[in-house]
Image (cartoon, rainbow, N blue to C red):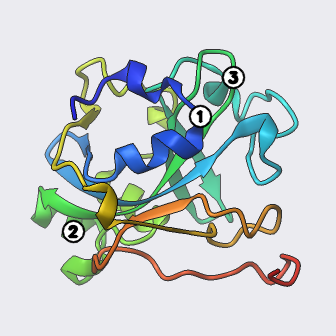
Amino acid sequence: MVLRADLLAGPAERVAPLLLGAVLRHDEVAVEVTEVEAYAGPRDPASHAFRGPTPRNEVMFGPPGHLYLYFSYGMHWAANVVCGPDGTAGGCLVRSGRVVDGLEIARERRHGAPERDLARGPGRLTQALGLSREHRGTDLFAGGPVRLEEGEEVPAADVARGPRVGVSQAADVPWRFWVAGSRYVSAYKRSPRAPAAL
């Protein structure tokens, strides 16, 4: 599949599995995406954009193919690929990946973590890539240092899906997608604030 910004203009839950196998790069470090979660803006109470635009989430209401970064739990940055038509918020959280370029730089940024854990989890992934506030809003298709590149397409039969990690609203919506059998996928943890599973 040829990865283009216009392919990201669909609903988040359709775009998310298309990102599996793509490569998110920042200069010398590149991560192959192994796990994503879809967040559908005003249709999704778990989305940062559910209640409309704010200075924090305004990137999500812009054109698809941009990078939405937010600071999570006061500890780390999380990277999202904006999707959906311009003006309609949507995003795909890049939860996990495998470092495929710049391994030593990523390992230094991650303080010598094992190779499997360099980008397994949203905070680890942004740390390995060296992403932070100044990269918010980056056009991932403009050819700059932070960009989304084509990778190996993941066959539909190899895409697993299930509920999203740690959300208290819409906790059972199966909008988490990952490469089945991959060692580079984070563990599922249900939010203790979520209602009991149905």
Q: In this view, does 147 lie above or below 118?
A: above
| Distance Cα–Cα, label 2 vs label 3 | 38 Å
Q: Residues within 10 Å of mark 3 (few under 14, many from 20)?
A: many
Tell me if I can see residue 58 in this picture: yes
The amino acid type found where label 3 is placed reads Thr
Of the residues tagged 2 and 1, which is closer to the observer?
1
Task: Tell me which label, 2 or 1, sits earlier in the chain.
Answer: 1
Residue 194 place in picture, x, y as percent: 83, 76
Of the residues tagged 2 and 3, which is closer to the observer?
3
The residue tagged with tag 1: helix, strand or loop? loop
Q: Name the residue under label 2.
A: 108
Q: Residues within 10 Å of mark 2 (few under 14, many from 20)?
A: few
Task: Tell me which label, 2 or 3, sits earlier in the chain.
Answer: 3
Q: Which mark is residue 31?
A: none
The residue tagged with tag 3: helix, strand or loop? loop
| Distance Cα–Cα, label 2 vs label 1 | 37 Å
Labels 2 & 1 near each other (Cβ < 8 A): no
Q: In this view, does 125 lie above or below 11?
A: below
The amino acid type found where label 2 is placed reads Glu
Q: Name the residue under label 3.
A: 88
Q: Specify whether 55 is left or right of 155.
A: right
Q: How crowded is mark 1: few (under 14 residues within 10 Å), some or many (20 or more)?
A: some
The residue at 26%/46% (across/down) is 22
Task: Tell me which label, 3 or 1, sits earlier in the chain.
Answer: 1
Q: For residue 116, which quarter of the picture?
A: bottom left
Q: Specify whether 55 is left or right of 127.
A: right
Q: Name the residue under label 1.
A: 11
